[in-house]
């Protein structure tokens, strides 16, 4: 059984997870992640409480119900001893050894299930803790993708399930790709002609964005949040997620290069980082590029860059004024 030192269990959590393991013939069982925070004033923490549930519904329970492969989680996974003995112990050299041992279990044909047995996990309540956690996870999942690529390819599962496993391990790539795309678009705004985003693709993006906002607010309301508080929490979480995109990209590159360094998530302790000034520079740069598009009356690309820059600038000023 894997648990974080700050995890909390219900009285019957272990019994329910074990019953699920026996009932469904599982070799490992993940538990239902429920976020908690000691800081009731942090909108970032409130946003993460919601996103933790959304992630559990989709990445764990959702994927299990449609027959996709589930990876173990670092906090709240129960393993059969026999399964661990067959694949070997955890690889302490890996950042996310939970995903790594999951890849080996899947390679050996072991079944990993998702259960509704609750485990409460503490979520970050400040920018630095969030920044450290997400960049480490981005590096760790990419590292597993690289080092266990062959195991996943050779696993005895269908093509669609293999594609899903790779997409799961690449879940941080969209942040990096969007950041690089924004850089390219901003350069084009200064030297090019035309509106690159004036196409039906922007409609697909808006529909996807609207779907996520609806899902987030729906879950937030179920947790007892008012509509305005739900939207403000979503806004803070989204802006911070966008703001750390450059560092997500760096973490992915570090994983590919093999030169990785990281620290554990400093929960409960507020620490400042100079990364916020880099975030501010990017925010003003993207805003300037959006103005360039507006001056040429290329409004779609201008609006998108203004929207994108808002995440950086909000994070920058929030942390600057919080000193």
Image (tube, helix red, strand yellow):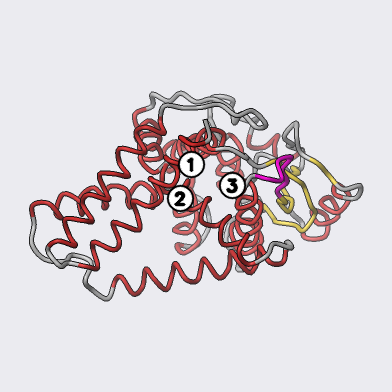
Q: Which mark is residue 239?
A: 2
**Mark 1 residue element:** helix
Mark 1 surroundings: few (<14), some (14-19) or many (≥20) residues within 10 A:
some
Whole-number angstrom distance, CA of label 2 to CA of label 3? 10 Å
Marks 3 and 1 in Cβ contact (< 8 Å): no
Marks 2 and 1 in Cβ contact (< 8 Å): yes
Upstream in sequence: badge 2 or badge 1: 2
**Mark 3 residue element:** helix
Residue 212 placement, left or right of 14: left
**Mark 2 residue element:** helix
* 267 lies above or below 39: above
Residue situated furthest right in the rendering: 11
Residue numbers of the magenta segment: 35-41
Upstream in sequence: badge 2 or badge 3: 3
Find out whether residue 59 is within the magenta segment.
no
In-front residue for pair 263/84? 263
Whole-number angstrom distance, CA of label 3 to CA of label 1? 11 Å
Upstream in sequence: badge 3 or badge 1: 3
Q: Which residue is mark 1?
A: 318
Q: Which corner quadrant of the image does residue 105 belong to? A: top right
Whole-number angstrom distance, CA of label 2 to CA of label 1? 10 Å
Q: Which residue is mark 3?
A: 44
Give x and y (percent) for residue 210.
Answer: 47, 71
Q: Which corner quadrant of the image does residue 149 belong to? A: top left
């Amino acid at each position: 059984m894997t648990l974080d030192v700050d995890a909390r269990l219900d009285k019957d959590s272990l019994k329910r997870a074990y019953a699920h393991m026996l009932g469904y013939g599982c070799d490992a069982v993940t538990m239902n992640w429920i976020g908690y925070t000691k800081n009731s004033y942090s909108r970032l923490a409130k946003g993460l409480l919601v996103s933790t549930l959304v992630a559990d519904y989709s990445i764990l329970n959702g994927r299990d119900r449609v027959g996709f492969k589930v990876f173990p989680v670092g906090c709240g996974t129960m393993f059969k001893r026999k399964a661990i003995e067959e694949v070997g112990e955890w690889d302490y050299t890996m950042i996310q050894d939970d995903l790594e041992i999951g890849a080996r279990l899947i390679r050996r044909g072991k079944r990993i299930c998702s259960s509704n047995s609750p485990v409460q996990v503490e979520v970050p309540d400040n920018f630095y803790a969030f920044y450290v956690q997400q960049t480490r996870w981005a590096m760790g999942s990419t590292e597993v993708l690289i080092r266990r690529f062959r195991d996943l390819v050779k696993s005895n599962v269908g093509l669609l399930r293999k594609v899903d496993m790779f997409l799961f391990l690449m879940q941080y790539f969209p942040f990096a790709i969007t950041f690089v795309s924004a850089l390219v678009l901003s350069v084009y705004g200064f030297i090019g002609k035309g509106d690159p985003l004036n196409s039906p693709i922007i409609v697909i993006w808006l529909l996807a964005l609207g779907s996520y906002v609806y899902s987030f607010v729906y879950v937030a309301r179920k947790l007892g949040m008012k509509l305005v508080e739900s939207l403000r929490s979503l806004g803070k979480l989204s802006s911070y997620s966008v703001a750390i995109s450059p560092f997500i990209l760096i973490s992915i590159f570090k994983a590919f290069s093999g030169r990785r360094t990281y620290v554990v998530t400093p929960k409960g302790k507020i620490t400042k980082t100079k990364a916020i000034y880099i975030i501010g520079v990017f925010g003003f740069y993207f805003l300037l590029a959006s103005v360039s598009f507006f001056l040429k009356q290329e409004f779609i690309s201008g609006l998108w860059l203004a929207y994108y820059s808002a995440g950086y600038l909000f994070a920058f000023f929030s942390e600057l004024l919080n000193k």
